[in-house]
Image (cartoon, grey):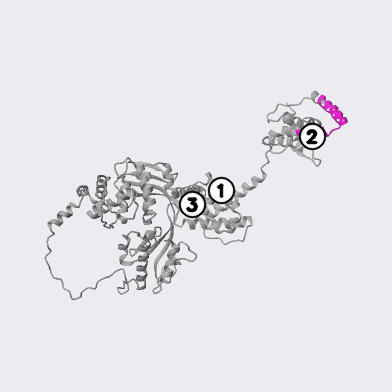
Amino acid sequence: MDSNQLFKYVYAKYGLKFKPIVANNTDTYILTSPVTNKYFAMLSRIKNRNNNSMAVLDLKCGDFASTIRDLPGFMEPVRIKSAGWVGAALTNNHYDEAIKKALDFAFKLAMNDQKVNVAQDQYFYIPPEKEEQKYQAQPIKPRDKKIIHKEKSLVPDKIRQMIKLYDYSILPIRGRAKNFFIQGRFMADYEDHYDKFFAFKRFFPSYHDMSVGQLRSYFTWRTKWRRGDYHRTSTSYAYVYVYELLNNIGVNSPEEGYQRLVEFEQNYIEKFDSGMQPYLADWLKDYVLYYDLGKEKIKTYFQNELEQDRDNEILHSPQKYSATELAEVFAKKTSYWKASKVIQTHSELFAAVLKCAWLELLNAKKYQLAYYSTFVARPKVIEQSVFKSAVFYPKSKTPITIQIDAIRKYHYQKGRWFIHLEEPVKRQKTNLNTFLHELDRLVREKFKLGRAIKPRVIDQAVLKAIEQGIRAYQEQAEQAKIDQVKIDFANLKQIRANASVTRDSLLTDEEKELEQQEEQKAVEKQNSAEVLTQNDYDLSPDEMFLLISLLKKQSWQTYVKQHHLMTSILADSINEKLFDKIGDSVIEFDENDQPQIITDYVEDLKEIFLKG
């Protein structure tokens, strides 16, 4: 029976409809009594660890809830953690009738304001008491010896021996887990085929808490389970089986124990009892660490912690990450980032400004404010037992330290974890929202974006850091604008050659002859002139020729044409190489686009290049 079939059944039988617990909510529905208007059933759509959706029905069954919970098809309630409620997963059609009967009982109970109406109820009968009856002492007959002998004969020798193994001399705090481990190892391979079933309910259950009938019921269920016959049992039996695996009872290696736990999660918890999921999730984390199952399994079970720690690492050391990565963390940890239309419209600008402002804000010495540890997160060490809330006996083990990531690590010593992590401060989200609001307000003001918004109360040191961060961004933006375009000189020679070929193809024979005569004269004149090519400024011979020609006011055009050079590129290169010496450009172009030495630097250049 799925949720839709349940809706139809309820409407057809009672004329009632499930209603969302909150408007437009499609995950949780309630069914209310038309008499008291109180809800007696709750349907929830939840996701298991594999991200698969499943429907769970919680029913208010009053004093009979504990009895119903031990019946096949039922479990602990998922949403309502109360003794008077039971849960049922709508995944197994085999239990549809049982769930319907429980729903009928919950409905009748709700119609009678949680009082069992004997006249109308068809499921339970409570006989009336005789008010005038008086107690009279009567002798209790001793039990028949044959019955006692028969009962003893029903206790298998293995179970009898296991019971005797319990050591009462050990203090209960430690003895409970140690006795469980010793008895469990003794019964690791035991199988039973008991034809009766005794329910069992106990917090932190162990073998010592069970009667003989319950022990036989458990071992019979375990025998079937190990053979692949998966069916529901009392929740306390299920926990005992998990405790065995946590202690590596009945397995040949920790890896096999891990596989059995995963198998149990898939075939029992997800099908019959999702209430066990939070406990097993925590125990699996401990399991992969305690038994050292490797980094890959750590990544599998610590996904949320790794993601949280990475976010904290980005906030703590933003210089190692991009502006986009920092913005993504703020989008997750705050509500303001996505709510601000101006930020969403100008997301790239705000991401860049955010990084500048955040880097500035983390400069504690400058602003006398430890912002991260005060308003975001601070280091903490949590101490807890290994496999918390489970019956587990820690064997002798050398202290170990396991580094989960840059922030989180687990240190094991004497059966306990010492977990080093970063804990979010109280009101972390509010603090980050306030910071973003002020950043948004000042960016709007400085860059003329959107409408102005009112300031919030914030530490003046934080405000100064934001303002300085905005100025830092503006300086970076200005610098980016004036950065010179880098020219790839590697391809310049080929460009010149191609241009020369194109030019030559356009000249007539007469023009070519005249050009050759002019070039010959220029070469003769050049050979007769002494050109300084050695210099301390890494100027090329072509650059030296142009510079000296301009200083001496000699012709340079023929040389440039003959060597297929571009005057503007030569001038730019000279300016760049002499900038450190002169502190300014030395060549400029006049209105006719002809190069000339800037008057202020003529004498300095002559002193450098024409003397000595």
Q: Earlier in the sequence, mark 3 or mark 2?
A: 3
Q: Secondary structure at mark 3?
A: helix
Residue denoted by label 1: 323
Q: Is residue 295 left or right of residue 138?
A: right
Residue 32, image quadrant: bottom left
Residue 416, given in percent of the width and then of the height, sits at: 33, 47
Q: Is residue 143 above or below residue 559?
A: below
Query: Which is in the foreground here, disc 3 or disc 2?
Result: 2
Measure the alpha-carbon separation of dots 2 and 1.
Answer: 48 Å
Residue 336, given in percent of the width and then of the height, sits at: 53, 58
Q: Is residue 81 visible?
A: no
Amino acid type indicated by mark 2: Thr
Q: Is residue 250 visible?
A: yes
Q: Which range is magenta?
A: 498-524
Q: Earlier in the sequence, mark 1 or mark 3?
A: 1
Q: Is residue 548 above or below residue 52?
A: above
Residue denoted by label 2: 502
